[in-house]
Image (cartoon, rainbow, N blue to C red):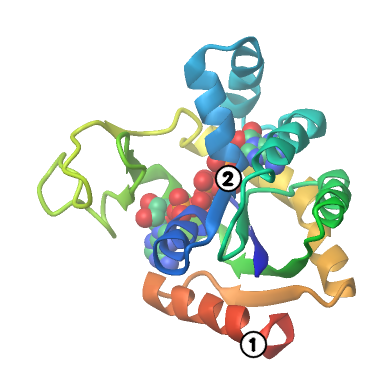
Amino acid sequence: MNIILLGPPGAGKGTQARRLVEKRAMVQLSTGDMLRNARASGSPMGRRVAEVMDRGELVTDEIVIGLIEEKLESGAPGGFIFDGFPRTLAQADALEALLASKGKRLGAAIEMKVDDDALVERITGRFTCGDCGEVYHDKTRPTAKPGVCDVCGGTDMKRRADDNEESLRQRLMEYYKKTSPLLGYYHAKGLLAEIDGLAAPDTVEAEIASVLSEGPGGS
Ligand code: AP5
């Protein structure tokens, strides 16, 4: 099944997407990761988007739709996980058209509901392994050995430039203004499933699993 993980910054989209990739042979398409890779490559597009991301604003629809289009060419035996895409109604329409052009369709848009106070705590404590991308948190998910990734043994731990309270406020504003209308859009299509993103990661994973087996109406 092809699914969208929808939710504000820090809702746990990336954390759950990684679990789905590992356990269900799904393919994660994170526009945030793609943009950070473009930025790290120093390409002209990467330089253009870096400032926008650091301010917590959305990159243009044209750029992210282009990135997704390219990735849809690859196969996904267990389905695609759209993580952080779509974020605007224009992106949602483009995704539907792109999937249809490849004979695919969306199975569910899963909203991970989390309140704003929890997001500040989650975002300001987050760090990731620069080698394998595993996501950690200073308080709730530290590495077993300080500075060493539990998964791959890497020692290149990274914090994102936009993971500070000021950028987060702007990212939240963008989410409520431009992305939250997608909740109504997918509800009207019968594709919206709501889950409690404040629950423990294993519980969130189980809720997503039930959407995958029963469809959006069964959750
Ligand atoms: P992006 O990279 O997509 O960031 P985001 O949506 O702000 O989401 P995050 O990655 O911050 O959070 P997450 O929900 O994945 O949480 P995580 O699992 O890491 O986008 C970044 C920027 O790129 C945007 O601001 C924009 O500029 C640009 N961009 C990207 N896509 C775009 C698009 N389509 N259009 C336009 N611009 C775009 O978890 C967070 C923390 O919480 C971690 O420390 C984790 O350990 C912890 N945690 C996770 N789950 C739980 C749990 N259940 N309980 C307790 N702690 C938990």
Q: CA distance from mark 1 to mark 2?
A: 24 Å
Q: In this view of the protein, can residue 169 be seen by the observer? A: no
Q: Is residue 37 above or below residue 154?
A: above
Q: Determine the residue positioned at 69% across, 36% down.
A: 70
Q: Is mark 2 within 8 Å of ligand 1?
A: yes
The amino acid pointed to by label 2 is Ser
Instruction: Determine which residue is flagged by label 2.
Output: 30
Label 2 crowd bin: few (<14), some (14–19), many (20+), radius 10 Å: many
For residue 78, what is the image quadrant? Answer: bottom right
The amino acid pointed to by label 1 is Glu
Q: How many numbered discs sit on the rendered protein?
A: 2
Label 1 crowd bin: few (<14), some (14–19), many (20+), radius 10 Å: few
Element class at badge 1: helix
Element class at badge 2: strand
Ranked by sequence position, the earlier of labels 1 and 2 is 2
Q: Determine the residue positioned at 48% across, 70% down.
A: 198
Q: Position of residue 209 (x, y in %)?
A: 52, 79
For residue 53, what is the image quadrant? Answer: top right
Q: Position of residue 145 (x, y in %)?
A: 10, 48
Q: Nearer the viewer, residue 194 or 86?
A: 86
Instruction: Determine which residue is flagged by label 1.
Output: 214
Q: Position of residue 18 (x, y in %)?
A: 43, 57
